[in-house]
Image (cartoon, rainbow, N blue to C red):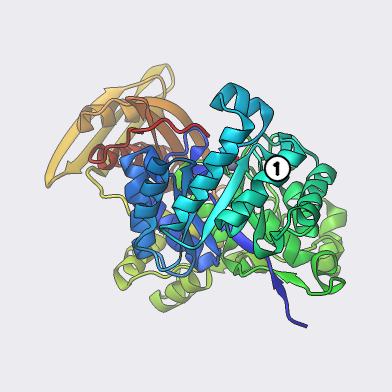
Amino acid sequence: MSEEKILIFDTTLRDGEQAPGASLSISEKLEIAQQLAVLGVDIIEAGFPVSSPVQFEATTKIAGQVTGPTIAGLARANEKDIEAAGKAIAPAKKRRIHTFIATSPIHMKHKLNKTPAEVLKMAVEAVRFAKTFTDDVEFSPEDACRSEMPFLIEILTACIEAGATTLNIPDTVGYVLPYEYGRIIAQLKSDVPAIDKCIISTHCHNDLGMAVANSLTGVRNGARQVECSVNGLGERAGNAALEEVVMAIHTRPDFFGKDRPRPLTTSIDTKQIYKTSQLVSRLTGFVVQPNKAIVGSNAFAHESGVHVDGVLKERSTYEIMTPETIGLSGSRMVLGRHAGRHGFSSHCKKLGYKLTKEEIEQAYQRFLQIADKKKEVFDEDVIAIIDDEVRVVEHTFEMVYLRVLMETGINPSATVRIRSKGQLKEAQSEGDGPVDAAYEAIREATGFSPTLENYSIRAVTGGKEALGEATVKIKTDNRTFVGRGVSTDIIEASAKAYIDAINRMVARGQQDDEPSVKAEL
Ligand code: KIV
Ligand code: ZN
């Protein structure tokens, strides 16, 4: 029996990036987009091109360099936005304009100050204008779930006539419950004439924790595209989490598949899920909570004796999915210090990395250093090493030496030596604690003093020899930058994270990131 596909529309780079503090550089967006293509998403919403020159450039670069998925650009229902989106996505082989306007009484009155008739006219004109750039046009009635059903039916009908090919039904404020969302999709499917010419899409926010449940109920009722983001990143409480939507469909074929006239499926290579989640977490600085479904570090960990006993006897007693399905190796101990270059390289491949020879060599040298200190190197360690070592950001500053002295009753002191543009600069400083002392010395050596907004440290794996991964968020001129550092020594990891964030700040300094149009989403 042939399968029926659920299109996965990834909005990590657009709605996801709207999460406060989650701003990404152009090269980081490109790196995520490349990985989304490897993951197998059908559509990448690359950005909101009119909103800033960086958004425009990032969308254009993704459109020109990422092959496979359709590249979408977001636009409000006006000519300026649509023209910017049309130009930005032009280099893509498959391109889409996603245009939207709010349709709920509350948004039309207070935000747009427009009558329903005016909104309807703008929507139709927007779709028609978007069609002059591409055949593939998606229309979203923003805040659809708080809109009046007769108006929703009227505007969607008019947009189909104007040429829309996908109709997206956003629960913009994460307000409805699964039963209600399912009913909305079912009613639109039955009452909008010619809706079968279009794909119905879900776009659910997670304010009440219902985003995934709502999206899946939408699918059960006829939606064939799900808009979602990696790790559920997005405005406020976020969007439906891609990994949860995909694994629900994958794990419950009885619910989504076999018993239906045509089984439902997605094009996602589930083995790429963990790696994609880690990449997005690393680049945005949004740490994945340990108990996060599918990709949290505890998602496949069994602690209680009864559970461990059950899993050892028969895995399916307590595991509904295997870690291998999302790209984690089943056995946790993977590489010892005697693993050769070839073993290391093929292991990286198994984890889903496509690295150049030089990148392999770089990561391998780091692996050897770490394997010398740690007896066991786990998948998570290898991923952290690659993510730490193989960077897309240019290193303006490189730490070549760090010494931190601590003694009870005396302020800790730190000495750092930093290489920049072929020159070495040394600085010494004291601080309240060892990390503070190191940061003060780094500030002096680099000449940059951004505000430290956030600092966290976690063990990549368990055990006393675990790699420590530090994440910092710094702020300067209202922009935030995230840096990460990995080491078996947590003070060194912390210093590396701070320098990484400063490097990102310097790299971004060359880009004008200020929004030229205020995004009213
Ligand atoms: O949540 C929302 O309504 C949106 C639209 C732009 C689709 O993100
Ligand atoms: Zn949204």
Q: Position of residue 99 (x, y in %)?
A: 51, 47
Q: Viewed as shown, does residue 323 lie left or right of 466?
A: right
Instruction: Examine the image and state in which quarter residue 391 appears.
Output: bottom left
Residue assigned mark 1? 152
Residue farthest left in this picture: 423
Q: Nearer the viewer, residue 245 or 2?
A: 2
Residue 303 visible, this orientation = no
Q: Identify the secondary structure beneath mark 1.
A: helix
Residue 197 visible, this orientation = yes
- Residue 60 vertical placement versus 102 (above, below): below
Q: Position of residue 192 (x, y in %)?
A: 74, 53
Q: Residue at x 69, y 54 (%)?
A: 244
Q: Nearer the viewer, residue 486 or 23?
A: 23
- Residue 42 vertical placement versus 26 (above, below): below
Total marks shown come to 1
- Residue 390 vertical placement versus 358 (above, below): above
Q: Position of residue 31 (x, y in %)?
A: 40, 57
Q: Residue at x 65, y 36 (%)?
A: 143
Instruction: Examine the image and state in which quarter residue 196 appears.
Output: bottom right
Q: Residue at x 41, y 43 (%)?
A: 79
Q: Viewed as shown, does residue 138 lie left or right of 485?
A: right
Quarter placement of the N terminus? bottom right
Classed neighbour count for the residue bearing mark 1: other residues with Cα under 10 Å, few (<14), some (14–19), many (≥20): many
Q: Quadrant of ligand 1?
A: top right
Q: Position of residue 467 (x, y in %)?
A: 49, 50
